Amino acid sequence: MSEYIHVHANMPTATHPKVCVATEYQDLSEAQTIVANRASMTIIGTNNTIDIDPSKSILEHLEINNIPIRSQCRSGICGSCRLKIISGKYKRETDFYLDEDDTASGYALACCTYPTGKITISLNAPRSTP
């Protein structure tokens, strides 16, 4: 007789921000891998670690979770949502504010950056003038 391991994860969606999904696994190592690799975002300087949906930008995740961040254009032009990626997996859309030195140093715009796995960010990125 096989035993099942139950894994619960919060999977926020636009219509159901606090949906809990339960999945059953027969193999403990598979369940541990899923939990360890769960997509989440940690914000340095706060006690916040939030589950993420890879289809939403960092800006959207912060707003959904009532974490204050400056933003204006929401399209990568103004640079007001600049932050620093400390570590993790993410994809970027083109922005018109950051230069190559900024991106090489880990800076990103929250409106144009989509976490794809575990990610750690700092919202206290120093401002620069382009």
Image: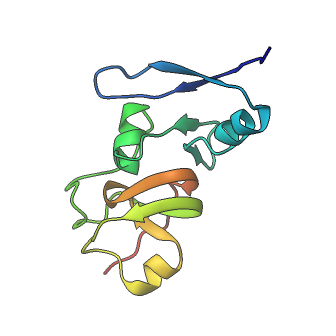
Does residue 94 sit above or below 26 in this rendering?
Answer: below
- Specify whether 116 is left or right of 98: right
Residue extending farthest front: 1
Q: Is residue 24 left or right of residue 112?
A: right
Q: How many marks?
A: 0
Residue depicted at 57% across the width and 53% down the height: 119
- Please tell me which residue is depicted at 59% across the width and 59% down the height of the picture: 88
For the N terminus, give its image quadrant: top right
| Residue 10 picture location, percent across and down | 52, 26
On screen, residue 86 above or below 49: below
Residue 90 vertical position relative to residue 15 in the rendered view, above or below: below
Asked if 101 appears above or below 77 in the picture, the reply is below
Q: Which of 57 and 67 is in front in this view?
A: 57
Q: Which residue is drawn at 36% across and 37% down?
A: 63
Q: Which of 83 and 118 is in front in this view?
A: 118
Residue 106 place in picture, x, y as percent: 52, 72
Q: Where is residue 91 in the image (x, y as percent from the top left)?
A: 41, 63
The residue located at (32%, 60%) in the rendering is: 112
* Corner quadrant of residue 122: bottom right
Where is residue 62, by image quadrant?
Answer: top left
